[in-house]
Image (cartoon, rainbow, N blue to C red):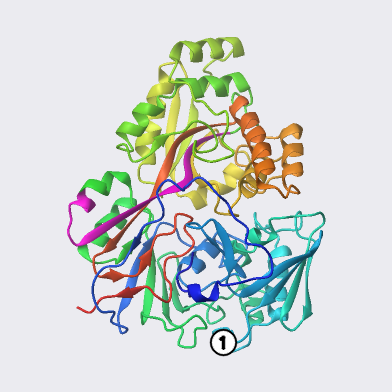
Amino acid sequence: MSTSIPRVLFVTFAAPTLTLSGCGFTGDAASSETASGTPDTDQRIVVDNFRAPTANWAVESDDAYILSLSGCLETLTTFDQDEGEVLPSLATEWEQTSPLHWDFNIRDGVKFQDGSELDAESVVVALNHVLDAEVPARAFNRTMIREVTALDDQTVRVSTPEENPLVPYRLASVNTGILSPAAYAEKGVDPFGHCTGPFTPVSEKVKQSLTLDRHEDYWGGDVQLAGAEIRFITNGATRATQVQTGEADISLSVPVASLATLEADPSVRVLSADSPRSSTLYMNNDRAPLDDVEVRRAIRAALDLEALSGSVYEGAALPSEGPFAPSEPWAEGANRSPQDLDQARELLADAGYTSDRPLEIIAIVERAEFGDVAAVIQENLDEIGIPVTIESKEYASAEPDVLNGDYDMLLSQRNRLIDIADPIGFLTADYTCDGAYNLSHFCDPAFDRILAEAVTTKEASERYELYAEAGKILDDQAVNAWLVNEQAIDAIGDDVLSYEQDPLSRYVLTAETAKASS
């Protein structure tokens, strides 16, 4: 949850609280660290983030995550990963008033950082901007939302084309963050001075940093920091080093190779939490030879995930057993077999595979360990006669070719619950025929029918059974090779106060985040 929203506000609302029990990161809760010390409200803080904005701050894009973790962008609802609940934020309560209508009451007395009032009409402008985006948001688009209208000054109605029990989850997505109407211009989105959160952006160094100041009139209470700088540091080793030298106060997503050094440093605290994130070898299902399921199965059989987990990840990640983590309630039936090189060779022979060209693996540089992961995979596949080359790229430069199908394999990681805190978002975006994030270029009408049924299913246990069926299709078809289930690992200076780690990578700076007096 966003600790900038006082828990006293979360007492009642009209609709029953939606819950996700056992949603895949319940084994170890997110770390919450409160060091001793007196907050110094004149202090500023530096956060090293692992990615930079790439879409001119378009809220429907992944840039929204940066605006959210920076304490700028807020949403109508928020998902509390500890409790597994959707809770109020800019909306105080909501109710499903008919099978196709959800009504949200907008919090009174909230002002945007430009001084204008938050009301139903400003929310309608913001949400319709997302719905009308040329590249739709994965969690909130016209396929599941018909329209957003204002019923009165403080009530917003979200209408759906068919019954959709997960609308409050969708409105917790950072892609539904609310900016003032003045933020939306012909040339793009301007978040500067137009958020509702505890920090307001004041300057930007393109692809380098974002500087923010305290929002003095924040609706959620006194802000404990004078401001912050978010630095965009793609190199994981650099992020780890900077928190040790004091150049950064918080470093997000530090690589496992840096853990031993960080844990031995008394000036640094290392926080870790189970996360619904898997490192994955994406395979282009629409390009030879990977369009042959037997070739994909051979690649999967050739991988030694136990050795990969123990070596590159130093035991800080567990071998995957399929598209979901074993602890997730929709992961029934997944059972990954150990490496079997003989079986892999037989599968290649049955497929008639010939190594007429090497296959390329793109390793995303934002994940420092992926270079080593790619080398292990290269060695595994060489043992069965598949030559592999490796190319390291920033994700932003790789994504256009990957989405267009102009690639063989990609090493990347995906947080299954980040778009919406339910697998429907991940499964729809990543694996349906028209999925907006279908990197695998997989299409199966039977899979799509299962997801179409799940999206209208109210009872969680029944949805989970459908997700398990969908997962079995992905597993049987060897759509990808899911490698390891990761932990979220952050490092913070020992003078950082009231920091709560968020495994879903949405919230970092809150009103309560503070730094101790020197």
Label 1 crowd (10 A; few <14 / some 14-19 / many >=20): some
* Picture layout, residue 70 above or below residue 114: above
Q: Identify the residue shown where x is 56% and y is 10%.
A: 349
* Picture layout, residue 251 above or below residue 404: below
Query: Observer-nearest residue: 8 or 320?
Result: 8
Q: Position of residue 118 (x, y in %)?
A: 64, 83
Q: Identify the residue shown where x is 72% and y is 41%.
A: 451
Q: Identify the residue shown where x is 37% and y is 24%.
A: 379
Query: Observer-nearest residue: 307 or 496?
Result: 496
Query: Observer-nearest residue: 454 or 282?
Result: 454
Q: Which residues are magenta?
A: 261-283
Q: Position of residue 279 (x, y in %)?
A: 46, 40
- Quarter of image, res 267: bottom left
Query: Observer-nearest residue: 292 or 297?
Result: 297
Q: Helix or strand or loop: what does disc 1 sit on? A: loop
The residue that mark 1 highlights is 114
- Tell me, yes or no, if residue 365 can be seen here: no
Q: Position of residue 305 (x, y in %)?
A: 41, 28
